[in-house]
Amino acid sequence: MVPAFILAAGLGTRLRPLTDLQPKPLVPIGDAPALEHVAARLREAGCTALVANAHHHAAEIVAFGRARGIEVSVEDGEPLGTAGGLAGAAKLLGDGDVLVHNGDVLVEMDLAGLVAAHESCLGARAPAATLAVVFGPKGTGNVGFDHAGRVVRLRGERFGPEEASGGEFTGVHVVGARLRATLPPKGCLVGDVYMPHMRRAGGQGAEIHVVSAKSFVDIGSLAGYLEANRLWLARRGERWWIGPGATVADSVTLEDTVVGAGARITGEGSLVRCVVWPGARAVAPLTDVVVT
């Protein structure tokens, strides 16, 4: 199985003030940090070598990685972006294809199948990349592709044959070895690598492919973060979860709410669609709130 690179160096500006306290990949989703959920799914898919990058609250990412067998490429100074971060981690990742996974998304899909689909395209000329996309109607989303699953549109720019379907890129993709050799020291994988590559290819989308993902949630916003916790509960078939050592007053009811370990809930009424971080204190009633 190819190694996996987890993008965890973002500033998390859309999720402030939560990310003033924690790096975005370490905010809790249910019973564990987001990064732990991502790492677990990658390992379930067969990825034994995991590497993450870090910039914002880098020391916390490094400590987390050390405790869980994830190597960390620290970006000093300014963050390098998705392309620069992957380039900067080259020594830790080694040569060849790499499965890249945003550290702030939870994706429902067959990750091993994504890698297998990429490798099945190998021939005289290996594919540049294979993107996991939630499919949609033609013209929708930030990716468009033809009947063969070849990308013909990215971020509104068209590159090749007629589009058959559209969709949303999940932030999970396999970057091929050949394309890795062209990565800039700083920049974005989509805007500074994939799109220029498509332009240079003269409108031929065959070198970048798509694979279907069932769904994904981006925890980069408060709404997305609350939704990720709600979906975590739904997958367990539960309406609430109370972590070890947490206490909830008898006068309080919970609905679609996660209460972290050691938290304390007092007051009267309900907590509805809330997330209470480990060790935090909350007073009911509350709705659609994160308590840190």
Image (cartoon, grey):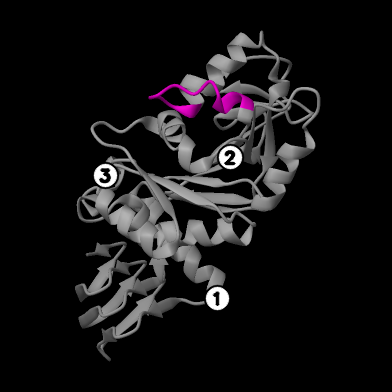
Query: Tag 2, which secondary structure?
Result: strand
Q: Is residue 12 magenta?
A: no
Q: Position of residue 74 (x, y in %)?
A: 32, 42
Instruction: Give the CA distance from mark 3 to mark 2.
Output: 23 Å
Residue at the image position 41 percent from the left and 58 percent from the top: 34
Q: Nearer the viewer, mark 1 or mark 3?
A: 3
Element type at mark 1: loop
Q: Which residue is mark 2?
A: 98
Quadrant of the image occupied by residue 276: bottom left
Q: Is residue 139 visible?
A: no
What range of the chain is rendered magenta? 178-189
Give residue 213's position: percent from left, percent from top: 64, 47
Tell me the amino acid under the disc marked 3.
Answer: His
| Disc 2 versus disc 1: nearer the observer | 2
Instruction: Specify the label residue 237 is tagged with.
Output: 1
| Three-letter amino acid code of the residue under disc 1 | Gly
Q: Nearer the viewer, mark 3 or mark 2?
A: 2
State which quadrant residue 236 falls in.
bottom right
Left or right: residue 288 versus residue 284 is right
Residue 292's spot in the image, x, y percent?
22, 64
Residue 291 seen in the current view: yes
